[in-house]
Amino acid sequence: MAEQRNGRDRQGKARPRNDTAALARELRRAVRGEVAFDAAARALMTMDASNYRRVPLGVVAPYDAADVAAALAVCRAHGVPVVPRGGGTSIAGQATGTGVVLDFTRHMRAITDLDPDVRTAVVQPGVVLDDLRAAAGAYGLTFGPDPSTHSRCTLGGMIGNNSCGSHSVAWGTTADNLYDVSVVRYGGGDVLRLGQGWQSDAPEGLRALVNGNLALLRTGFPELPRRISGYALDALLPENGVNLARAFCGSEGTLGVVSEATVRLVEAPRARALAVLGYAGESAAAEAAPALLPYGPLTVEGMAEDLVPEKERTLLPRGSAWLFVEMGGDTPAEALSRAEHLLKAAQALDGTVVTDAAGQRALWRIREDASGTATRMPDGSEAWPGWEDCAVPPARLGAYLRDFRSLLAEHGLRGTPYGHFGDGCIHVRIDFDLLSETGVRRFRAFSEEQAELVVAHGGSLSGEHGDGQARAELLPKMYGNELVALFGRFKDVWDPAGGMNPGMLARPARLDENLRFAVLPKEPVDVTFAYPQDGGDFSAAVRRCVGVAKCRTEAASGAGVMCPSFRATGDEQHSTRGRARLLHEMLAGEVVTDGWRSEEVRDALDLCLSCKGCRSDCPVGVDMATYKAEFLHHHYKGRVRPAAHYAMGWLPVWLRAAAPFAGVVGIASRVRPLTALVKRLGGIAPERDLPTPAPSTFRSWWRARNGGERERPPQPGATTVVLWPDTFTNHLSPDVGRAAVRVLEAAGLRVAMPPRQLCCGLTYVSTGQLARARAVMRHTLDGMERAAGLPVVVLEPSCAAALKTDLPELLPDDPRAATLASSVRTFAQVLEEYAPHWQPPRIGRQVAGQTHCHQHAVLGDAAERRLREKAGLTGALSGGCCGLAGNFGFERGHYDVSVACAEEQLLPSVRDAAPGTELLADGFSCRTQLEHLAGRRARHLAEVLADGLVEEPPEGDRKVV
């Protein structure tokens, strides 16, 4: 009866009383922020980074605290539950809900006060952690807790989960760094200011509840540095200072909504040194960790070799598992001395100390990406969270890991632990089969036994991410039924109507309910790409996205690319994760109901630049460029396509047709009314200049150069390389091809070309015309048969990437595709591999410009960097994406996003370049974007090196084929 009076059903969920349309209308009237009840908005919020999925009714992005109160009042009146959500990176399911989601990533992102003298900051719940750290860093301060999602998680979410991070051995959890918090309860009304002492705004009945259960509260909680499970009711004991803010922290949105918080800042060490210690195995590393704590480390992180990519193992000392131990100091010398002292005392198998910032960032990136890389086992099979962050006393960690491994083996499961060894907190993804009924039953059985194992070692079911739906059902194993019943009474004091995030912590849903995989197709979807990393299963490819949201970072770092459209728009649907979520819901068919014809998915993919940045930068290798091409192929099958698909997708055809009339086309391109008409008919942005064909193609030059000459035998030992005449080089930038020939021949290589014009199919792939792409690619394979086994030099990075990846994935049954893909080399790669002793001309200039996004994502640029260094071309190229991205920046409606992408890194790097700096851009798109937006001409590396060569030899002395 009490549950009926409180407006809840028997699971503690608020019961909707009115229709959704009325709810949406009232919310729009009540709040100033955005209110969205459309299919796309709902689909984006169905999942977080967990195994769970719950479909909301709608999404509200509150503009301020008054909006929060107004939204909660409307939802209470309608009996609709509310879920506050930050970055959506929760791993236990607590950021999903069936009612209204409050999205704090759009507004309420202000740091309203920062006092460096008292070392506090007042923040709104949507503040991203890295933004707070940057603001505090100006005063030599930082916020201590730093989960691996620090570039996108919000302070509100951190308070909700009591987040920790790698530096908790030094600075504790979020609760340890929280002074007070302002909370709005379900139904709106007054804002509670929670601090220390009963003089704070405690809800009515809370003090009586605590005083009536003092004995239980004093005996029911284990002492652990990482006890995150359950409600922190022991913080309300008199001997613990009656800390209401601490008791609220970690409540997972089940008590109220944070509207503001005052947090503690700590002094950041002026210098840091990272000691990396190698051990024979993870248990040895775990057993060594507690002995390092007396040395005052900032971090003691552990991971095993299974999570380290092969190419990055050279960065680590000898061993099969490692501890990352960071030491601080007032000076670099002091930090180094402390790290070296620890290294000597650690008795590790091997070790090293890294002091340079770049080296430390590279190592920390390995550790931070583990939450994504752990989702794939070494054999490529999937692994999932669920037991992501158990914690035991640090001294018990080694023994716990051995028992944990044994339990995995008993259930026929695999997982690779890593995490915060200094705090006894372990992260692990396990290869649960969550697609079949048998697998789900095994998941439940393992979970129950795992909970008992953790408790037997004196641990907490959650040591960082909270209980959510993944573990709350098992809390009686840790706390006993009496204390868990008290948790329910505690929630009722705060939320008597049961509207705040029902199903979490108190009266929880079962851990095997609401699994996000249950709605996906049971049989593989009929697709065109092969998806070799996902067993040919498009659903498995989409499942790759686990929601860690590295794509949601708002500032590109270093050479990274992902995700330029999100950084340009700030809109979740234009992130890699957002698009993956929409594709997931398209396959599910519940929210997005029209499958491949979905306009919601089409609109989200419309601003995907197909930069392929996610293919390399996403920790789990989501390849949204491929998914976009697949979707467009099905979406427009049998239908008229956008005009730009015909204009830009068929660009190779139009350029070949125009080649004999290049002079006339060049004149016509200067007639504004004519070009305006062409752009309108072709779906091309009116702000763009049309690319003008060169007066003579590269292949014409090649034929003229070789015409009438008797072929000279190659020099002894000379290697023949095939120079690929891509469409862009052949028709638009023949100077690049001519320069490449000069350099390759100067390096002693014998240059050949295909007997006829061939195409990689890139423009057809990027516009989703996959049937045409496959036909073009088959024609290409026919034309390259005579060159089988020879290295193929591709000057245009996007074409090289298409041949390396799209070709074998679209023609998986043709062995010639794999052969050609394996033969592809970039200009620098072929020189390094086949002319290793050649010394390029010494140019001796600074460089600026951009590494092509496809080069970064698919090909790598290490050879280019080494070649530039040999030539005395100093400085680094920027990362990110130029924003033109082939057809993307030319299409009508994309111009503003295209410019925004260029303004992120490329254009500022060029503007800041000193006079005389050489502008480098190997991609035609990058060069075109610079010319259009900055009026500057960039060059291919081949052109720069060719300029430094001695005069070209006379006609009769050239080596030709």
Image: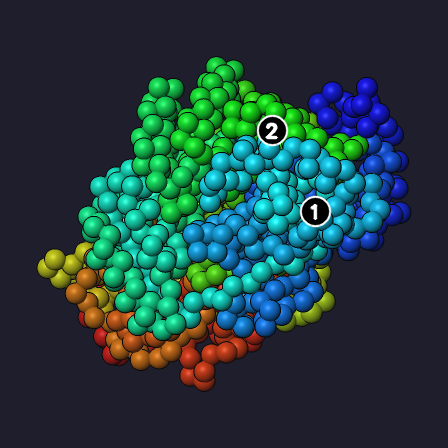
Above or below, 507 against 626 in this view is above
Question: Mark 2: few, some, or many residues within 10 Å (few <14, many ≥20)?
Answer: many
Q: Is mark 1 on a helix, strand or loop?
A: strand
Above or below, 324 against 38 in this view is below
Question: Is the Cβ of the residue at disc 2 closer than 8 Å to that at disc 1?
Answer: no
Q: Residue 179 or 679: which is nearer the viewer? A: 179
**Residue type at tag 2:** Leu
Question: Mark 1: few, some, or many residues within 10 Å (few <14, many ≥20)?
Answer: many
Residue 487 position in % (x across, y down): 65, 31
Q: Is residue 352 left or right of residue 99?
A: left
Residue 694 position in % (x across, y down): 48, 66
Q: Image point 78% across, 54% down: which residue?
A: 65
Q: In which quarter of the image is the C terminus?
A: bottom left
Q: Mark 1 points at which residue?
A: 103
Find residue 827 and report its image quarter: bottom left
Q: Residue 561 or 391: which is nearer the viewer? A: 391
**Any part of residue 491 in sight:** no
Q: Image point 63% across, 56% down: which residue?
A: 179
Q: Is mark 2 on a helix, strand or loop?
A: helix
Q: Mark 2 points at which residue?
A: 483
The extreme top residue here reads 438
Q: Residue 382 or 805: which is nearer the viewer? A: 382
**Any part of residue 475 in sight:** yes
**Residue type at tag 1:** Asp
Residue 634 is marked as: none
